[in-house]
Amino acid sequence: MAAAVNGTAPIEPPSELYQGRRAALPLDIVVVGCGLGGLAAAFCLAMAGHKVTILESVATIGEIGAGISLTPNVTRLLIRWGLEKRLNEVAVKPEAQTLRRWCTGETLSWIQWGDSMAQKYGAPPYHIHRADLHRMLYDLAEPHVNIRTNCRVVSMNPSIPTLMLRSGEVVHADLVIGADGLKSTSRHFVVGKPDEPRFTGDAAYRAVLPTELLLADPDLRSLVETPEMTTWLGPQRHIVAYNIVRIPLSLFFPAFPPDRIENRAKEEYNIAMCYTDRDPPEELWRIDESADRMKEVFVGWEPRIQKLLSLIPSTLKWKLMDRAPLETWIHEDDKLVLLGDACHPMLPYAGQGAAMAIEDATVLGSLFSRLSCRAQIAPLLHAYEAIRYERATNTQTFSRLNKATLHLPDGLEQEQRDGKMRAAMEDALKKTHDEVLVGSTDTNTNGNTSQWNNEKKIAIQYGYDADEEVEKWWHQHGESEIGPLRAPAMS
């Protein structure tokens, strides 16, 4: 069992994954990128029996991002990997999601999460700072893989495959996993030409506040006393906010520069503000922005929003970039494959970016735990794409639909949306309190156009189990199509 790190819960990785199955033919695999998807892929492939090296471009791994929401489709995997104790220490379990009107704060929708979601979908939701999740996956993967920093890939021959680093070093591999994010270099080699993301016309401000500031204000106290995700819906913009917990960076990365270490072992309040951006698209993707400019975007929003924004001294602004779905995630010579944002970037309107990358990693690991000969490499890569392509593409669509619902201008369509949300909330509250009204209308919400209140759509998204999907695919296709390619047993 791994030892606890300065008071943090120990990571207890499973002694085995994939029902104890490990590849009969271990490969030398290079993962490009040490983000969430890269670390998850490296861990899964190492547990499948392969030798894995991560090439990360930056010299020092540091703190990036803000809060993210983890839904049951990804938390079930993290728990399966032995991360439940760490999650319970550094993350918050939200009890509900509340949607509010931008100008009045009126509650439009309330959806129970917490234990109810865990019972429905087999795992709980969490809110966590991205840096804490990254450190968790780093701690999980590091004992099993070779993590090389300051190794920027500048060129690649995916037919061999080899990778040329900025230092001039040439790295050889049997298989390359391109997990290098939205600005992926690996993607260029799959597409066959430079392929840049496009600006969506939207941007996001992100900020993190000490919870104690909200507790000191009677009007804001309720936002943090009960851990919920609160979303305010407005014309061409929305705000989402929730509690997160932070742990001191030095506990995980002792070599991190001391002048950048902050004491974060306390609760904080994460705020993300998305809006239609009028600035020219050629600006940097991420820039420091003045708080005054941020406040101008949300003039006229309800008093609690004005108080929250007044507590933010400065903020970061992200341009929201997107890509159209690729025809394939696999290079034509079947020795390079993409994962996560490198092939299917997710806009933030459904909170599924990290989940999709970690699901990808799980599927790759499970499939390649079955590898016994080189003839199986190509069909296993195409099996990965077959299992994941529709799921990832549908989730991209799900996220874009959420944006349209969140950002409706005031008017008839917005009033209809709000009415449906209120009706669904009333039904949910009746169910929660076991109220049965004689003669009430059918409370089934499967046909509700709101993404949040459509139980069928939510079940598809959150009930997904990447490990089970691989087992299902293998029994339906793999045993007959890929299994016979295995090397003959030695007599």
Image (tube, rainbow, N blue to C red):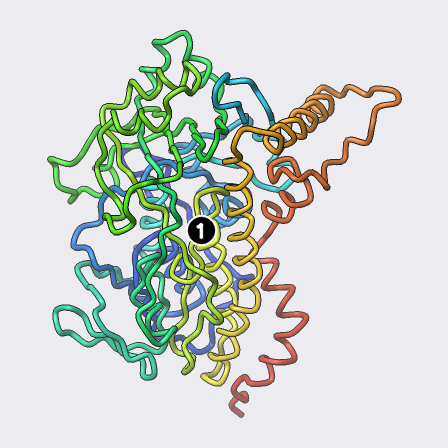
Residue 127 in the image: above or below residue 159: above
Place of residue 47 in the rendered image (x, y in percent of width and height, measured from the top left): 43, 62
Residue 481 in the image: above or below residue 416: below
The quadrant in which the C terminus is found is: bottom right
Which residue is farthest bottom? 491
Q: Which residue is mark 1?
A: 346
Which residue is farthest right? 439
- Residue drawn 52% across and 68% down? 384
**Left or right of residue 187, residue 156 in this image:** left
Q: How many marks?
A: 1
**Left or right of residue 435, residue 351 in this image:** left
Kindly tell me whether residue 18 is visible in this rendering.
yes
- Residue drawn 88% across and 22% down? 439
Element under disc 1: loop
Disc 1 residue type (three-letter): Met
Place of residue 205 in the rendered image (x, y in percent of width and height, measured from the top left): 33, 35
**Left or right of residue 473, residue 171 in this image:** left
- Residue drawn 19% across and 55% down? 58
- The image quarter containing residue 455 is top right
Place of residue 479 in the rendered image (x, y in percent of width and height, measured from the top left): 63, 76
